[in-house]
Image: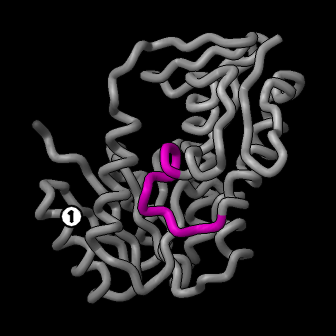
Amino acid sequence: MESRKILVVDDESRMRKLVRDFLVKQDFEVIEAEDGEDALDKFYAQKDIALIILDVMMPKINGWEVCKEIRENSKVPIIMLTAKGEESDELLGFDIGADEYISKPFSPKILVARVEAILRRTGKAEEELLEVGGITIDRLGHQVMADGKELELSYKEFELLTYFMENKGIALSREKILNHVWNYDYFGDARTIDTHVKKLRSKLGSKGEHIKTIWGMGYKFEVE
């Protein structure tokens, strides 16, 4: 089986080596970039990058700008790394299309576990189409159609909508959603879910009404 390529972007060579060593042990192929400009050049040159681990604070072009540009052209999963732990930074990362957000210092083993979890989900061969309430999800093609129009969803929005539709009519607690969509090792705030649901409803338009809020608990995908 061909090794999947991970692009590791960080201006600290020591950090790149640390992450690379752990990824290589799990049979990933690692491409390194030392700044944002280098990252974009290598991303466009490689074409088959499976996932990007992207530092925020870098010279030339910072991580936010790199993430925004890549999102305009690709849905490749992006994990943001930052020395800051402020909620505003985390929400900004999700707002521009990041899929995961990890604050330094972090456990390399946890990082690798998240990489594997994301790639396992995106590469899982399930029934191709899921149709509920006028929304169609093509799992293999990673596409969502609502009212005949294709929606541009981030990786996490796609996973969240899929989870809701797979569990239609079932009340889902925020804890259960975090465990399934963000995986057990996510240490962020449950408000992250609310932020994603708000964006998801907006993108779904009238179909967003299918996602009902259960006050004090979580959400339920309901089709009348």
Q: Is residue 187 magenta?
A: yes
- Which is more toward the observer, 37 or 183? 183
Coordinates of residue 165 in the picture (x, y in percent): 62, 23
Q: Is residue 218 magenta?
A: no
Furthest residue in direction front, as rendered:
216
Tell me the residue at 38%/52% (across/down): 51
Tell me the residue at 84%/38% (across/down): 202
Tell me the residue at 61%/38% (across/down): 160
- Which is more toward the observer, 61 or 154? 154
Coordinates of residue 220 in the picture (x, y in percent): 73, 31
Numbered circles on residues, count: 1
- Which is more toward the observer, 80 or 43? 80
Q: Is residue 59 visible?
A: no
Give, as a single range, the part of the protein colored magenta: 179-189
Q: Is residue 156 visible?
A: yes
Coordinates of residue 140 in the picture (x, y in percent): 43, 22
Instruction: Provide the residue designation for mark 1.
Output: 23
Indicate the quadrant containing the C terminus: top left, top right, bottom left or bottom right.
Answer: top right
Location of residue 171 by image quarter:
top right
Coordinates of residue 194 in the picture (x, y in percent): 75, 52
Against 28, residue 31 (above or below) is: below
Residue type, numbered disc 1? Leu
Find numbered disc 1 in the image and state the secondary structure of the residue it sits on.
Answer: helix
Tell me the residue at 43%/56% (across/down): 184
Q: Is residue 198 left or right of residue 187?
A: right
State the predominant SS element of the stretch in magenta.
loop
Against 122, residue 146 (above or below) is: above
Against 154, residue 88 (above or below) is: below
Q: Is residue 126 left or right of residue 217?
A: left
Indicate the quadrant containing the N terminus: top left, top right, bottom left or bottom right.
Answer: top left
Against 129, residue 78 (above or below) is: below
